Image (cartoon, rainbow, N blue to C red):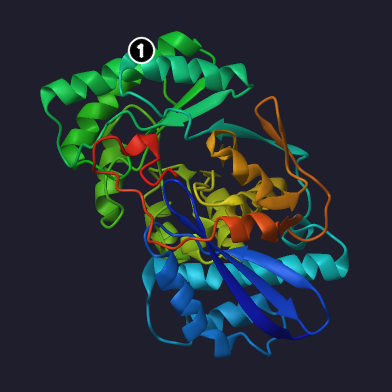
Amino acid sequence: MKITKIDTFVVAMPWKNWLFVEVHTDEGLTGVGEATVNAFARTVEAGIRELEDLMIGKDPFSPRRITESIRRDLYTDGGQVHGCVAAAIEAACFDIMGQALNTPVYNLIGGKYRDRIRTYANGWYRGERTPENVAKCAQEAVAIGYTALKFDPFGDAYRVMSRYEEDLSIDIVAAVRSAIGPNIELLIEGHSRFTVATAITLGYRLQPFRIGWFEEPVPHHRISSVVEVSRNVPVPVATGESFHTVCQFAELMKYDTVHILQPEPMSLGGIQPLVDVAVMAEAHNCMVSPHCAQGPIGSYISMHLAAACPNCYLKEHFDDFEVDWVKDLVIGGMKHEDGHLIIPDTPGLGVKFNHDVITEHLSTENRYISLFKPGWEMRNQYAD
């Protein structure tokens, strides 16, 4: 079997672009992939075209060799963009293999360990940034079955916060905890915003609300900063979504301070790197909860990892809080109920594109979310 053609599609969401890929073969099988990264959809698309000669004519049953040629053999580090190029093709190859063998992708990475995975809601807190409104939104998310919620209460803060903004952020967290009760897991997103000192201060202020984790409290570029925060706050720290190599996770884990790892399947380079991180994490007594804030193919990839990996903790889930047409963008077997994702037995990734919907929503402009502008949490700056 050989790869014969690669198609790309940039789809316009109200808050950013999604980049999807179809990989075609000479035996009629087509695999799907995704390469979404904020603000750089066209850049990644160009990267796929620039490196297309490394993919065309290759055997989709050799995804590791293909991705090594895309990343290692070039002797160039293109960071998250480079990782997304590899991820899109690698995921499509796994999809093709699963279809050819009539088995789900999770059977290619260890076999099914569980039948369902608990999810946490994200994207639910759109609206006015007040304790009352965010608490109301939290109650609505819990009402549809979620047992865990994640959100960023910190507005457009960068590095440090005024006393007013810090107090408002904590008041919002307090209102949410009061509204949802003590048994719903509450996860606080930091979006790499803070200095070490600010992050430590906030970590102590968050302790009374029994949060499940404080995510990305400081920028990922200096692992020593992440380690210092995790050693000095009384709440769990989670990180990893911005890493683009398995080596960065290895560097972090040697300190044995962060025990919730969040590999992002796009920027990390696909399914096999996710598995590599999960295996290393298990050796370090860590849990993984893949970052899953991109499009639906990324969600399916995370689902397959969750199905196969014993140390997968939670799966991020935006799907219930996107615009209505997103549910028709793909045709697949993913079923979400009672705060859990039910693992299907469909061959491959288990999903196909609905080309009618893709064509209707093809992007004609650059769309991205800016986390340091007031109102970013509305995620509707490009709403039609």
Instruction: Judge left or right: residue 87 versus residue 308.
Output: left
Residue 347 vertical placement versus 341 (above, below): below
Q: Residue at x 82, y 66 (%)?
A: 99
Q: Is residue 284 visible?
A: yes
In-front residue for pair 300/332: 332
For mark 1, give the secondary structure.
helix
The location of residue 141, given as percent across then percent down, is 54, 22
**Can the viewer see residue 275 in this picture?**
no
Which residue is at a point 24% across and 42% down the rendered structure image?
Answer: 373
Query: Of all residues shown, which one is farthest toward the right?
Result: 102
Image quarter where the C terminus lies is top left
Is residue 195 rendered to the left or right of residue 347? left
Instruction: Say left or right for 60 vs 42.
Output: right
Q: Which image quarter: residue 324?
A: top right
Give the amino acid type for the residue marked by disc 1 in the picture. Answer: Glu
Q: Given the current orientation, which residue lies at the most extreme left position?
A: 162
Picture coordinates of residue 241, whole percent (x, y): 43, 51
Q: Quadrant of the N terminus?
A: bottom right
Q: Residue at x 68, y 87 (%)?
A: 58
Image position, residue 69 (x, y; %): 54, 85
Residue 371 occupies quadrant? top left
The residue at which mark 1 appears reads as 132
